[in-house]
Image: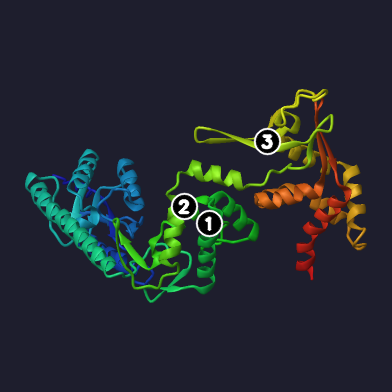
Amino acid sequence: MTSVNTPMRRLRCAVYTRKSSEEGLDMEFNSLDAQREACEAYVASQRAEGWVCMRERYDDGGFSGGTLERPGLKTLIKDIEAGLVDVIVVYKIDRLSRSLMDFARLVEVFDKHGVTFVSVTQAFNTTTSMGRLTLNILLSFAQFEREVTGERIRDKFAASRAKGMWMGGFVPMGYDVVERKLLINDAEAAAVRHIFQRFVELGSATLLTRELVANGTLNKRGRPIDKGFLYKLFRNRVYIGEAVHRGSSHPGEHQAIITPELWDQLHAILRESPRQRAANTRTQTPALLKGLIFTATGVAMTPTATKKGSRHYRYYTSMDAIRNRAGEGTDGFVRLNAGMVESAVLQHIRSLLRTPEIAARAVEAARRNERHIDERDVVTSLAGFDGLWQSLFPAEQARIARLLIERVTVSSDGLAVDLRTEGLGSVIREMLTPKQEMAA
């Protein structure tokens, strides 16, 4: 009788490794390598049973075992679902998961695809009820250990903050971290003091942002400052020498940049409603067309404002209407919305500056005082007018408007804007000065 030898089934073994922190992962032989070496040795010892180690690596360095959101684990699960894995080999159970609920989900996936689970340092067989019971008990302790460790870390962090110690995180503008301590960066600290002082003077984050952008002030990351950054800066108590943890403030080990008096002044302004501060800003903002806008009959229109509830509205109102003098030929223009008129005038100026005629007049005006000015530089400057305008705060915009505008006439046909040729030359020279200084 002839005997037939049944070929041994080949079991594909996937080695999974994990380490919670990234510390030491850059070493030539790290914790992940040590785990993998032990698992491969175990698989080699089972070669007689048909075990073969897969070449694919399923590693998660710097990922917690309290979640399944791990790239290496996700790749492993995809390969299991694709039928590419027979046995999962780990160094310890908690390398796969520290959460009892997460592990139960993984076991369901393993069972569904006929995959067994092996721990090198703990002998388990997940296909038996006793093996599952033992696993659940160990996982319960692993989860308990993780929670206790988390509580211990949080308590240590809170105690350290209570002592005023720096516990890491994003380094605030004005400071550098040296040997885990906050030390003042003199250049940045001067910028922070200036920002606090200017806000107290202006009372407006919008105006301050425009001013800082125009001056080229950058934040800690080298980016232009915006309003969101300013409000975070203003609420950071690190600047008055304090350390904050979960709403509680403690004296810090670092030096303060801002005095308590300046902090109190700024926060007194912040306690006003944003709408009220915006209204205050508008009342302090010079009217763009003051002294420049007239009706078709030559009657001046002056800036006026009204208040309805908490809202302020700006207008340009005919002097005849203010003096209760209807007059003949007023064209019916008694009061115009200031914002709409200013926007229309500005748009008209932008259109004029793009025309060849105005460009030629600008070159001629600019060369009256400086003959060496290049025509191409003038054209480039005119094209960059929008950028210049947006970078200016209101007082500067009003000054530029007076340099450019001779007169604005309001009639039934619309707006007529007369430009000042000499003023056009002055603006061009101002725009070219920074380039000339840089070239020098």
Dot label at residue 213: none
Residue 105 appears in the figure: yes
> Mark 1: which secondary structure?
helix
Task: Specify which label sits upstream in the sequence, 2 or 1.
Answer: 1
- 410 shown above or below 139: above
Circles 2 and 1, Cβ within 8 Å, touching? The answer is yes
Image quarter in which the N terminus is found: top left
Residue at 19 percent across and 54 percent down: it is: 118
> Mark 3: which secondary structure?
helix
Q: Quadrant of residue 163?
A: bottom left
The mark total stands at: 3
**Three-letter amino acid code at the position of disc 3:** Ala
Residue at 16 percent across and 46 percent down: it is: 3
**Three-letter amino acid code at the position of disc 2:** Ile
Q: Mark 3 points at which residue?
A: 338
Is 346 on the left-hand or right-hand side of 125?
Answer: right
Image quarter in which the C terminus is found: bottom right
Q: Quadrant of residue 246?
A: bottom left
Q: Name the residue under label 1.
A: 199
Residue 345 in the image: state x and y as whole percent: 75, 37
Crowding at dot 2, Cα within 10 Å, few <14 / some 14-19 / many 20+, comes out as some
**Three-letter amino acid code at the position of disc 1:** Phe
Is 428 on the left-hand or right-hand side of 226?
Answer: right
Residue 158 in the image: state x and y as whole percent: 25, 63
Crowding at dot 3, Cα within 10 Å, few <14 / some 14-19 / many 20+, comes out as many
Q: Which of 169 and 315 is in front in this view?
A: 315
Q: Gap in Å between the C-alphas at discs 2 and 3?
A: 27 Å
- 222 shown above or below 6: below
Q: Gap in Å between the C-alphas at discs 2 and 1?
A: 9 Å
Q: Name the residue under label 2.
A: 269
